[in-house]
Amino acid sequence: MPEDEEQPKKYRIEDLPGVGEATAEKLRENGYDDLMTLAVASPKDLSDLAGVAEGSAAKIIAAARKFADVGNFETGEEILERRKSVQKLTTGSKNLDALLGGGFETQAITEFFGEFGSGKTQIMHQAAVNATMPPEAGGFDSDVLMIDTENTFRPERIIQMSKAKNLDPDAVLKRIHVARAYNSHHQILLGERAAELAKEFPIRLLIVDSLTSHFRSEYLGRGSLAERQQLLNRHMHDLLRFSTIYNAVIAVTNQVSARPDVFFGDPTAPIGGNVVGHTATFRIYLRKSKGGKRIARLIDSPYLPEGETVIQISEEGITDGV
Ligand code: ADP
Ligand code: MG
């Protein structure tokens, strides 16, 4: 076929030396279903998850690195081209969209942090509803994957928000796939398995509410901090990888510690330290205000100025605060 001549040959994992059918099957079952995934795997993970000896795992990874189109250095022009595929999902509030440069961005992680009741879960519910809307309405016409660690997903709330947007609530509920994570390891596993669901449904929004609560309660004390941070780092990179492969929005929530740090003049600081701080592309701090009003402050963005805006939480969901 002449049109194939211009395309580089696509290798399958069976094409790698040392990967027979049985190994290929084991690798696929564990999510290592393409060369790129293998190329960036660690020998230890591969060995633990797919049951191949660590030495063989290292050889498979080395081969995958040779065969995979890992990409080389890109010019700014090329990156600009890739960024053209970035899309924006509306938050429901024009103010908040503007603060974020147009809404939640694909190929990135957006983190909302704030104290209990500051509206993090409401914003996640609204994002889920919005993602199902057509692009003309600021959505992706997509399904949603929600990893719920605190058992705070409420279909009743989705119904209210859907009605406010004149959407069919049943149709919206059908497109939101909720997975309850019982502990941090379960949460990590669900993050790894997200790709499987994405093969069946068009998932363009992945929510983790909350990103840090299990990690916080399970890894107490100084001694376990390094392990916690390492696992959190791995989890966040799984999420980031999903966001680039599927051109998806990753929206996560985070709590604040009760530590009396001075943090932008507020005695609260987000959990997760540098790992979360450096991996989240956008960080928004939520504060309670009068009534259903909340103040959202963008505190970290690669290219947007810091700023604040007001949003409103009501029965209709998230709207502008003014
Ligand atoms: P967080 O996740 O940050 O702890 P939530 O997102 O659960 O906080 O926000 C809870 C707040 O959202 C409640 O205190 C209430 O003010 C508001 N809220 C929740 N449901 C509704 C509703 N149906 N109508 C109006 N406001 C609501
Ligand atoms: Mg919550």
Image: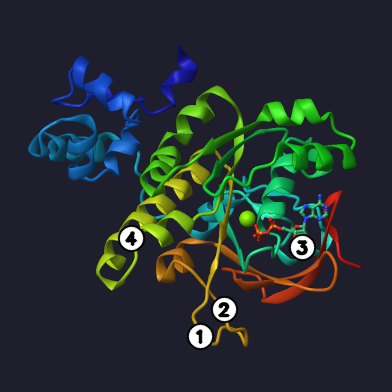
So how many labels did they put on this image?
4
2 vs 3, front mark: 2
Horizontally, residue 167 falls left or right of residue 262, namely right
Q: Which residue is mark 4?
A: 228
What secondary structure is marked by label 4?
helix
Q: CA distance from mark 2 to mark 1?
A: 6 Å
Residue at the image position 28 percent from the left and 37 percent from the top: 38
Residue 234 drawn at (x, y percent): 35, 52
Q: Which residue is mark 2?
A: 268
What secondary structure is marked by label 3?
helix
Residue 149 drawn at (x, y percent): 52, 47
Residue 99 drawn at (x, y percent): 74, 67
Answer whether labels 4 and 2 touch (C-beta < 8 Å). Answer: no
- Mark 4 neighbour class, 10 Å CA radius: few under 14, some 14 to 19, many 20 or more: many
Instruction: Report the disc number at residue 261.
Output: 1
Q: CA distance from mark 2 to mark 3?
A: 21 Å
Q: CA distance from mark 3 to mark 1?
A: 26 Å
Q: Earlier in the sequence, mark 3 or mark 1?
A: 3
Q: Earlier in the sequence, mark 2 or mark 1?
A: 1
What secondary structure is marked by label 1?
loop
Q: Which residue is mark 3?
A: 96
Answer whether labels 3 and 1 touch (C-beta < 8 Å). Answer: no
Q: CA distance from mark 3 to mark 4?
A: 32 Å
- Mark 2 neighbour class, 10 Å CA radius: few under 14, some 14 to 19, many 20 or more: many
Q: Earlier in the sequence, mark 1 or mark 4?
A: 4
Nearer to the camera, 196 or 153: 153
Answer whether labels 2 and 1 touch (C-beta < 8 Å). Answer: yes
